[in-house]
Image (cartoon, rainbow, N blue to C red):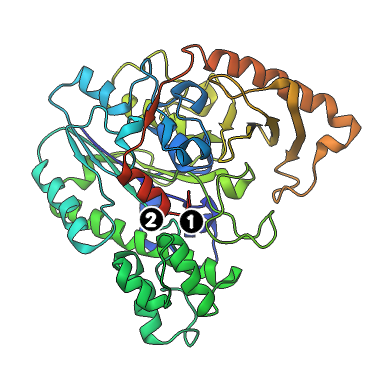
């Protein structure tokens, strides 16, 4: 039995063609959707990379796995790591099937626990550059005929939006287009020549300067560049699928494609359209695609009920016919929605360390609260809750009308808050996780992505 989990960092749920997007950003993913179960209302459990990916790989909320701090501790080169009582998905798989090969292709910090349980730990983005991509394809060939679990993660949609496929013809000349398409691969000296700047502040910020100087730093062009990154990744997925077919792996492998969070393009915060996420729980921040190709079943099925990333780990365990550990909070997506125990979706933890936001969705209602001075392993402070928001996503999909401001909905919001208190009290049953010092490679990578200065 074989599984491939692909995470496309920063991919908004509504930026793919099957969602009805106006650009044909994902022709290969669209074909995969026709052969899969597609969940158009899937949510991340955090709104930035580290907590969200740890939820994806453990089946637990950030308040349980412990990687739930903001970016301020990382500024000090320290961050909370995966709780010892919670196991990463490959650890669970290896405990039941020692001969199953677990393979990781992802530049996510090993310090935080992302390497646990992987037999083969490749710490680079396999979609960035031809040589790295070929190593990914070669690894599938090596594992042919064996049981395996692959975790594949790419940053190529994340800022800097360095692909120009959808930039309007005539907007830039051929030289500038080529510079955009190879910006990530440039050395620091090469980037300095392109932007004519003496000091480097990191890849994402260098690119921002390049965009400004070439009159591309506006919402429409930045969105075209972002969409170009989506298209680039989709082309890689197409080639990956073709190789799986050539190796006679495709028909019997389960493929899961998802994302850790979305991206904001002037939706709710005016004039913010570049590398803006981890700030809130509006739909553009937390709605992500989930596509599952299950061998010989569920072809072309669409499930509209809300699900979240903590459901992916138990789905994989369900596929392998393994027992789901008690610490897992998600539920298998292979089980009919009518038999789910939990009918709510939770997201938590944001970038700013001095406040915390929590989100809960039940049915069409979505409740968001902001807390000042969060405390404890769950980062909660119920005495300092400000700016509660309640939205009816069916009637108000753009989240413009805060129902909590209407007196007749106040009790509804307070009932959500009571439910959240109960959920987080249970979620933090293992207490705080330990902190670790991050290595310089991790710090530099986060600087390149624009997370820290």
3D distance between C-alphas at marks 1 and 2: 8 Å
In the orientation shown, which residue stands out farthest toward the front? 198
Discs 1, 2 touching: Cβ within 8 Å: yes
x then y, percent, for residue 90: 26, 28
Residue 447 vs 338, above or below: the answer is below
SS at circle 2: helix
Q: Position of residue 250 (x, y in %)?
A: 22, 47
Q: Is residue 15 above or below residue 330?
A: below
Q: Is residue 177 above or below residue 53?
A: below
- Residue under numbered circle 1: 18
Query: Alpha-carbon neighbours of circle 1 within 10 Å: few (<14), some, or many (≥20)?
Result: many
Residue 180: percent from left, percent from top:
39, 73
Residue 317: give x, y in percent of width and height: 32, 25
Q: Which mark is residue 70?
A: none
Reading the image, the residue beneath label 2 is 29
- Quarter of the picture containing the N terminus is top left
Disc 1 is placed on an element classified as: helix
The residue that appears at 21% across and 23% down in the rendered structure is 94
Residue 176, by quadrant, is bottom left
Q: Which of pointers 1 and 2 lies earlier in the amino acid sequence?
A: 1
**Left or right, 345 with reference to 250:** right
Which residue occupies 37% across, 86% down? 174
Give the residue drawn at x 37%, y 15%: 85
Number of on-image labels: 2
Question: Image point 55% across, 44% down: which residue?
Answer: 278
**Is residue 253 at all visible to an observer of this figure?**
yes
265 on left or right of 103: right
């Amino acid at each position: 039995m074989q599984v491939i989990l692909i995470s496309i960092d920063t991919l908004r749920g509504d930026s793919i063609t099957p969602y009805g997007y106006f650009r044909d950003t994902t022709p290969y993913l669209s074909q995969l959707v026709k052969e899969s179960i597609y969940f158009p209302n899937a949510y991340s459990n955090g709104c930035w990379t580290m907590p969200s990916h740890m939820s994806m790989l453990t089946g637990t909320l950030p308040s349980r796995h412990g990687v739930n701090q903001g970016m301020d501790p990382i500024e000090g080169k320290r961050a909370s790591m995966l709780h010892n009582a919670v196991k990463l998905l490959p650890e669970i798989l290896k405990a039941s099937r020692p001969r199953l090969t677990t393979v990781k292709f992802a530049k996510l910090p090993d310090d935080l626990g992302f390497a646990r349980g992987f037999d083969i730990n490749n710490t680079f983005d396999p979609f960035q550059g031809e040589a790295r991509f070929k190593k990914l394809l070669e690894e599938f060939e090596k594992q042919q005929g064996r049981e395996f679990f692959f975790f594949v993660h790419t940053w190529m949609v994340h800022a800097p939006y360095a692909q120009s496929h959808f930039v309007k013809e005539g907007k830039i000349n051929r030289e500038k287009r080529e510079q955009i398409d190879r910006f990530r691969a440039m050395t620091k000296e090469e980037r300095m020549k392109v932007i004519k700047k003496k000091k480097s502040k990191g890849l994402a910020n260098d690119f921002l300067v390049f965009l400004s100087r070439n009159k591309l730093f506006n919402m429409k062009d930045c969105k075209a560049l972002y969409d170009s990154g989506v298209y680039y990744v989709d082309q890689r997925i197409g080639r990956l699928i073709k190789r799986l077919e050539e190796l006679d792996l495709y028909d019997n492998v389960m493929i899961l494609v998802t994302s850790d969070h979305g991206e904001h393009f002037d939706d709710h915060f005016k004039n913010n359209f570049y590398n803006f996420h981890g700030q809130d729980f509006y739909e553009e921040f937390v709605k992500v695609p989930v596509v599952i190709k299950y061998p010989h079943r569920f072809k072309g099925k669409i499930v509209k009920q809300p699900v979240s990333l903590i459901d992916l780990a138990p789905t994989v365990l369900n596929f392998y016919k393994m027992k789901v550990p008690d610490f897992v909070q998600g539920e298998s997506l292979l089980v009919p929605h009518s038999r789910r125990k939990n009918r709510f979706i939770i997201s938590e933890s944001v970038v700013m360390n001095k406040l915390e936001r929590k989100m809960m969705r039940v049915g069409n209602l979505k409740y968001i609260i902001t807390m000042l001075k969060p405390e404890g392993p769950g980062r909660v402070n119920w005495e300092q809750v400000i700016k509660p928001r309640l939205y009816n996503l069916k009637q108000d999909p753009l989240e413009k009308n805060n129902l909590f401001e209407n007196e007749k909905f106040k009790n509804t919001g307070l009932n959500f808050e009571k439910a959240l208190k109960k959920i987080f009290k249970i979620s933090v049953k293992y207490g705080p996780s330990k902190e670790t010092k991050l290595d310089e490679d991790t710090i530099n990578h986060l600087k390149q992505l624009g997370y820290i200065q």
